Amino acid sequence: MAVCNSADERVVLCGPDGEVVGTRPKRYVHHGHTPLHLAFSCYLFDEAGRFLLTRRAYTKHTWPGVVTNSCCGHPAPDEPLESAIERRTREELGISPIDLTLVLPTFSYRATMADGTVENELCPVFTALASPTTPTPNPDEVDSAEWLQWTTFTADILAGERQVSPWCALQVAELVLLGPDPLRWPAAEASQLPAAAPRTARH
């Protein structure tokens, strides 16, 4: 499937039950009344269990310069989430994800920026191993990236000592319930994904 360039990128709009109700160019989606749409979050780890934290580019339309998880994005229409994650981690970080695992299939959130811009997403969460482990951030997407011990990172979040994106804070609160070792988290069932997410044979 061909994926449009960033100028033509379209996002998948969702109904209240997670079904596809249409698509819209990404540049017209995020505003004060952002419609519910399909997205993803990915947390990249190395074999030692360290987590790759990123800071969003300061030129981003939503949450510029905010610290967050390794990679976030929107699948193109009819694009499986796994394919979208592979595409975006390469584009943003120069990294190919290995052993993609679905861990939070039903995560969703709504958040509002100080200027009134709303994010409103059905956002399944995946983990993966990073290859290579040295990122090469695309400055249009990522300002910086660093490896951290997962347990230190989550303890700081839960204690309110580190500020991150609203979706990352909410995801961490759920991820810590899966156990202290992210390399041992159980895989979730793909059947729990929103109806708008195309299924693949991987899960």
Image (spheres, helix red, strand yellow):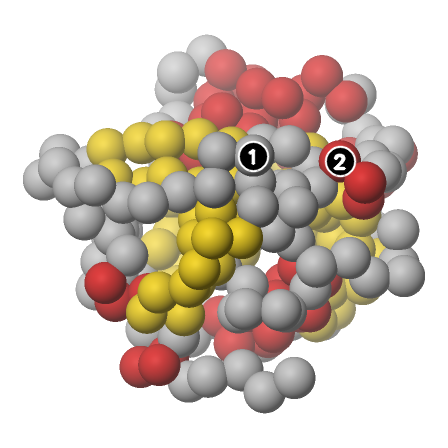
**Viewer-proximal residue, 96 or 191?**
191
Using residue 120 as the reference point, say whether residue 108 is left or right of it. right
Amino acid found under the numbered disc labelled 1: Asp
Q: Which residue is mark 2?
A: 192
**Residue 173, numbered circle:** none
Of the two numbered discs 1 and 2 in the rendering, the one whose residue sits closer to the viewer: 1
Q: Is residue 52 visible?
A: no
Hey, which residue is sitting farthest left in the picture? Answer: 115
Q: Is residue 58 above or below residue 76?
A: above
**Viewer-proximal residue, 138 or 178?**
178
**Which residue is located at x 62 percent, y 69 percent?**
78
Q: Which quarter shows the N terminus? A: bottom right
Q: Which residue is mark 1?
A: 17
Q: Position of residue 76 (x, y in %)?
A: 53, 69
The residue carrying pointer 1 sits among few (fewer than 14), some (14 to 19) or many (20 or more) residues within 10 Å by Cα, namely: few
Q: Is residue 143 above or below residue 47?
A: below
First in sequence: mark 1 vs mark 2: 1
Q: How many marks?
A: 2
Q: Is residue 108 visible?
A: yes
Real-space CA distance between mark 1 and mark 2, rounded to the nearest whole angstrom: 12 Å
Using residue 45 as the reference point, say whether residue 16 is left or right of it. left
**Viewer-proximal residue, 79 or 159?**
79
Secondary element under disc 2, as helix, strand or loop, is helix
